[in-house]
Image: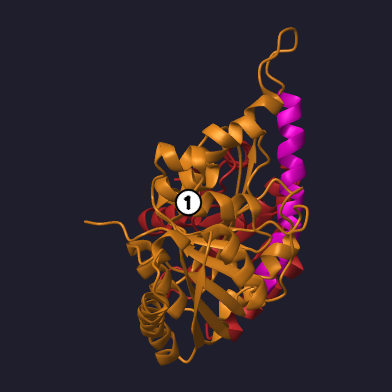
Chain colours: A orange, B red
Amino acid sequence: MDIQKLLFVTKFDELRFDALQSLLPLQKAALHHVVFLNVIEREKVALRRGTGYQKEEEIKLREKANIRFIDWAETLFEQGLEVGVYIVVGDYVKQVVDAATKEEVDLIVLSPSKKGKLEKLFSESEVTEILHRTGVPVLVYKNLAPGGILMDKPFDRILMTTDWSPAGDSAVACLKNLGTLVQEIHVAHVAHEKNLQTDSAMAVQKTRKETRNKLERICDIFEAEGIHSRPHVYIGEVETEIEKAAHECRATMIVAGAKNRQSWKERILGSLTKTLIETSIFPVLLIPPEKSG
Amino acid sequence: MSKKVLVVDDDPDVRLFNTTVVEEYGYTPIEAENGEEGLKMIKEHMPDLVILDVMMPRQSGIRLYRELKTEKTLKDIDVILLSGIAEKTFLRSQKALTEFGGKEVPEPAIYLEKPVEPEELGEVLKKILG
């Protein structure tokens, strides 16, 4: 899968042009089209008792966004990129899904919106909803969030995590197409401690060896594309170990396969995808499994 | 029969403004809301002039302009670029696309920066179409 067209979703205060600029090396791979999307939340212009629909406010917000986008677009046009713009009023997830579908984008870049604790607990994350409904990889960029970092070259050193799911295969297919844009890929699997409950050190080492061999096979795919790759086995809580691995590899991005739909249990207890979206300080690229049929 | 002018713009308000001016100056307006649709309309209606926006969903005016000016049967159709994007940005973008291995394209007949007054647009229409 080539990334030829990306959708950059921004409310301006959480994702700025510098984040997009850091992704422009993708032009070396296949990127030639950037589509901007600004969703004006309905509540900001909604019907209010005594005032009605705030048309003036809508115009103000639209033009404010338009001015920023024109400025950004000028830079991109001059680099030979194609640029499109959507400024829409409505539900965030629906508008992202609509624009991604209409434009047939290959990547969605966004920053998750801030949610209250209760909302976080019960709602499926907007990001996983978008992943499920579009089937398009989503890059979660949080450089303006507390502790978030802006990478100069986010595709330089990638930490790819795998749980051997079909989405992991899609992640491999996506990354190998990036070719020399990527300097290193560290492929990691986190084995849960409960899987190692045995009184034999040999058995634990056997598990480690088997896991490592499986990871080596993934690394071979990347090496064949000229991308330096190394396997890593971690033991413990998946979310904690992945963040640890990202630091140890000096990763510039975490890439993970994402299930299309979270179960209720995952929504409440959390899933790797949800935790990475909410807590990781690294840019996180989530890749859904190939759509079947 | 009056001359045909195709207005390509994603903003319905701008399309309405442009088509009204076109009509008031005695020409026949037709309209499209993005570059893709615009190219289809050009091939179907062979307009005498295209008023083209630059930044649009699906396909931008930059691509449409290139396709128009590199297509033997369409390259003589005059184009007015009407955009919020500065003219020098447009020209640089064409240069960059040429450097990426594309054909060199001529500059547009007229480049107008939005917003434009009705009289200004009308005068330009008269100048090009007579």
Residue A254, given in percent of the width and then of the height, sits at 57, 67
Q: Which residue is drawn at 58% across and 86% down?
A: A183
Q: Nearer the viewer, residue B57 or A138?
A: A138
Q: Which residue is drawn at 43% across and 39% down?
A: A265
Quarter in which the C terminus of chain A is drawn: bottom left
Q: In this view, does A6 lie to the left or right of A77?
A: left
Residue under label 1, please give it: A100
Q: Residue at x 74, y 37 (%)?
A: A61
Is residue A106 visible in the rendered image? The answer is no
Chain part drawn in magenta: A55-79
The answer to whether residue A209 is above or below residue B11 is below
Residue B73, given in percent of the width and then of the height, sits at 40, 71
Q: What element carries label 1?
A: helix
Q: Does the magenta stretch include residue A61?
A: yes
Residue A201, given in percent of the width and then of the height, sits at 42, 77
The answer to whether residue A49 is above or below residue A109 is above
Q: Which residue is drawn at 72% across and 74% down?
A: A152
